[in-house]
């Protein structure tokens, strides 16, 4: 696995791919998809592509819901 290219969460794009989430968390990409499928990591599908909103990832990791 390569070294993380982000310094902090402010550097992240607003929408993340499962690959970027895997890189951030230091896990394999299959594990990132498992977080979505089995553990409730919120995601959006745009044109068939899975995307995770940065604010939802941060809140999910903290165990909180994002206010709409």
Image: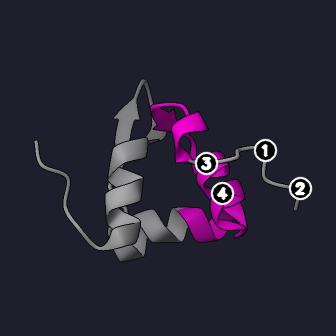
What secondary structure characterizes most of the magenta part? helix
Question: Which is nearer the eye, 14 or 27?
Answer: 14
Q: Residues within 10 Å of mark 4 (few under 14, many from 20)?
A: some
Question: Which is nearer the eye, 55 or 41?
Answer: 55
**Gap in angstroms between the C-alphas marked 1 and 4:** 8 Å
Task: Name the quadrant containing residue 3.
Answer: bottom right
Mark 1 or 2, closer to the camera = 1
**Gap in angstroms between the C-alphas marked 1 and 3:** 9 Å
Q: Residues within 10 Å of mark 1 (few under 14, many from 20)?
A: few
Q: Is residue 7 visible?
A: yes
What residue lies at 47% left-to-right and 34% top-to-bottom?
15
Of pointers 3 and 4, the one earlier in the residue sequence: 3
Q: Is residue 28 magenta?
A: yes
Q: Which mark is residue 23?
A: none
Residue under numbered circle 3: 8
Residue under numbered circle 2: 2
65 displayed left or right of 3:
left
Which of the image's four quarters has the N terminus? bottom right
What residue lies at 41% left-to-right and 55% top-to-bottom?
57
**Is the Cβ of the residue at disc 3 closer than 8 Å to that at disc 4?**
no
Q: Is residue 12 visible?
A: no
Task: Name the quadrant containing residue 38.
Answer: bottom left
Residue under numbered circle 1: 5
Q: Which mark is residue 24?
A: 4
Of pointers 1 and 4, the one earlier in the residue sequence: 1
What residue lies at 58% left-to-right and 50% top-to-bottom?
18
Residue located farthest toward the top when viewing the structure as drawn: 47
Badge 1 marks a residue whose secondary structure is loop
**Gap in angstroms between the C-alphas marked 1 and 2:** 9 Å
Of pointers 2 and 3, the one earlier in the residue sequence: 2
């Amino acid at each position: 696995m390569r070294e993380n290219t982000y310094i902090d969460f402010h550097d992240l794009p607003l929408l993340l791919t499962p690959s970027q989430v895997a890189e951030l968390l230091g896990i394999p990409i299959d594990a990132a998809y498992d977080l979505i499928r089995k553990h409730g990591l919120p995601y959006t599908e745009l044109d068939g592509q899975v995307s995770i909103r940065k604010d939802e990832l941060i809140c999910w990791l903290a165990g909180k819901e994002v206010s709409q």
